[in-house]
Amino acid sequence: QKEVEQNSGPLSVPEGAIASLNCTYSDRVSQSFFWYRQYSGKSPELIMSIYSNGDKEDGRFTAQLNKASQYVSLLIRDSQPSDSATYLCAVNSAYSSASKIIFGSGTRLSIRP
Amino acid sequence: EAGVAQSPRYKIIEKRQSVAFWCNPISGHATLYWYQQILGQGPKLLIQFQNNGVVDDSQLPKDRFSAERLKGVDSTLKIQPAKLEDSAVYLCASSLVGTSGQETQYFGPGTRLLVL
């Protein structure tokens, strides 16, 4: 079982709709959860972080965390063509005196006009 | 605030040659990471430094890869000799633990390596 799993997509969503991206993780002691956006040929860019159960909203983005189900999601409202990118889920699993950030393989999102 | 700097941005070498990548993290960031990202995959952690000490290098192919972070600032990653399957983007990242104890990671632009 992969430590961080995402559906590779591509996920195609019409412009203006809600895009829903999902991620599951295997390490129950994980404490921090991140969503990165990566445009083709570019490096990952942090868009959301979430640390406690529930929802966290930032503009058009909402991150949802359910530690009991080991599940984290990202909702993008009013999807724009500029949201077309690969979205990487990352999980911080603390161990010994340091932490380790593990990435999923990413979900490709395509917003169609 | 300057971001994470990496060089070179692109490198083409033949298999069995050597190559080195350089990373300068954001000033004050104690933790530095090197990731390998193969096309279509997520970043895979190669090595993590805390200041100038190695925290995790469990996925670093030590027979051909080496990394160092002298003085706890800049870092270099070396591949010797390179194989075809080393073709990837090598990402450097640095992180800061905030006052709340939460860590935020920032990536450099990456070095795209092609091994022929």
Image (cartoon, grey):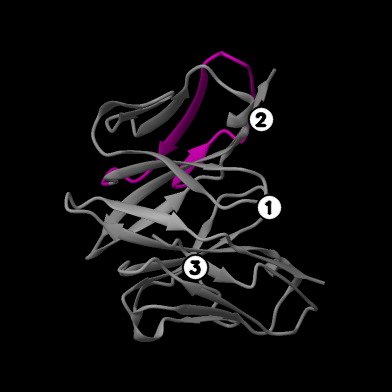
Q: Which amino acid does label 1 sit on?
A: Leu
Residue A29 placement (x, y as % from top left): 26, 46
Magenta span: A2-29
Q: What element carries label 3?
A: loop
Residue B39 tag number: 1
Question: Vertically, is A81 above or below B55?
Answer: above
| Res B71 → quadrant | bottom left
Rounded to the nearest angstrom, the CA distance separating label 2 from label 3 is: 28 Å
Q: Which amino acid does label 3 sit on?
A: Gln
Q: What residue type is labelled 2?
A: Pro
Rounded to the nearest angstrom, the CA distance separating label 1 from label 2 is: 15 Å
Q: Are marks 1 and 2 in contact (CB under 8 Å)?
A: no
Q: Residue drawn 78% across and 78% down? A: B15
Q: What element carries label 1?
A: loop
Left or right: residue B67 compared with residue A12: left
- Pick whichever of labels 3 and 1 is earlier in the sequence: 1
Question: Vertically, is A87 above or below B86?
Answer: above
What residue did someone put label 2 on?
A10
Left or right: residue B16 compared with residue B88: right
Q: Nearer the viewer, residue B80 or B6?
A: B6
Task: Find out whether residue A27 is within the magenta segment.
Answer: yes
Task: Find out whether residue A9 is within the magenta segment.
Answer: yes
Q: Residue drawn 17% across and 49% down? A: B100
Rounded to the nearest angstrom, the CA distance separating label 3 from label 1 is: 18 Å
Question: Vertically, is A13 above or below B32?
Answer: above
Residue A46 placement (x, y as % from top left): 44, 45
Q: Are marks 3 and 1 in contact (CB under 8 Å)?
A: no
What residue did someone put label 3 on?
B59
Q: Which of A67 and B74 is in front in this view?
A: B74
Q: Chain under label 3?
A: B
Left or right: residue B84 compared with residue A80: right
